[in-house]
Amino acid sequence: MSDRGILIVVSGFAGSGKGTVMERLLSGYDNYALSISATTRAPRDGEVDGRHYFFVDTEKFERMIEEGELLEYARYVSNYYGTPKSYVEKELSRGKDVILEIETKGALSVKERFPDTLLLFIMPPDADEIYNRLKKRGTESEEVIRARMSKAGEEAKLIERYDYLITNDDLDDCVSKVHSIIQAAHLSVSRSSDRIRAMQEQLKKYS
């Protein structure tokens, strides 16, 4: 495994269960760090500032944009979401695999700036399941749910630009697949240049 961690972006439709998948991944394995996003949306019941999100007002968020403090940011259903840079870089340098749970446009923006980023998309087995999961939350109006479903339609057009697609119809299986994909990525040739060069040098004495 390389000394430096891998930057991983996980996206998925609202209601895909990606947050639960990430929680299971972090509790089940030691080498992951979940990047905490900043957002201007209001906290949901049970969400804690600094743990689930950094909850800030619009004025502060726009100041963070101006001062270059964000790895990426986007506006989603009337709210800003963004990734603070400092935490991500610190964890990668410690060898942690850092997971960003962000929407599609932000994900592709990160991939453009950092081509080695691993993009994973998680989705439910069908569209009806997305709607049913959002409805079951009981936290949003029908209007907001419809807006999220419309947004899902736009996001679906970008899935083919991701590296891997994982269907979340069984939570344990989904978590296992995500972990396996990330571990396999550590063995890719593009992330093994130091080991390749070392072997090339060692073999010279046999030439």
Image (spheres, rainbow, N blue to C red):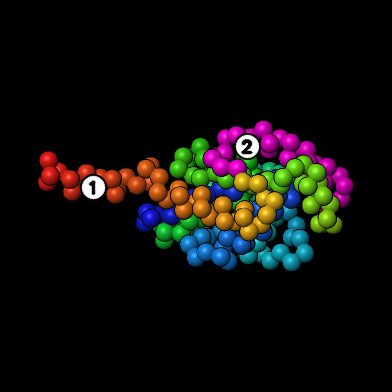
- N-terminal of the two: label 1 or label 2? 2
Q: Residue at x 56, y 52 (%)?
A: 178
Q: Which residue is drawn at 38% across and 42% down?
A: 190
Residue 89 shown left or right of residue 156 in the figure: left
Q: Which residue is drawn at 58% across and 66% down?
A: 27
Q: In this rendering, does residue 84 appear at all? A: no
Q: Which residue is drawn at 45% across and 43% down?
A: 116
| Residue named by callout 1 | 199
Between the residue at mark 1 and the residue at mark 2, the CA separation in whole angstroms equals 37 Å
Q: What element carries label 2?
A: helix
Q: What residue type is labelled 2?
A: Ile
| Residue named by callout 2 | 159
Which of these two is toward me, 47 or 17?
17
Q: Do the residues labelled 1 and 2 touch (CB within 8 Å)?
A: no
Which of these two is toward me, 24 or 146?
24
Magenta-drawn segment: 140-165
Point out the frontmost of discs 1 and 2.
1
Q: How far from the left and from the top, in percent, is residue 47?
A: 71, 64
Q: Which dot marks residue 16?
A: none
Q: How far from the left and from the top, in percent, is residue 50?
A: 62, 64
Badge 1 crowding class, 10 Å Cα cut-off, few under 14, some 14 to 19, many 20 or more, is few
Q: How far from the left and from the top, in percent, is residue 175?
A: 60, 56
Question: Is residue 148 magenta-colored?
Answer: yes
Q: Which amino acid does label 1 sit on?
A: Met
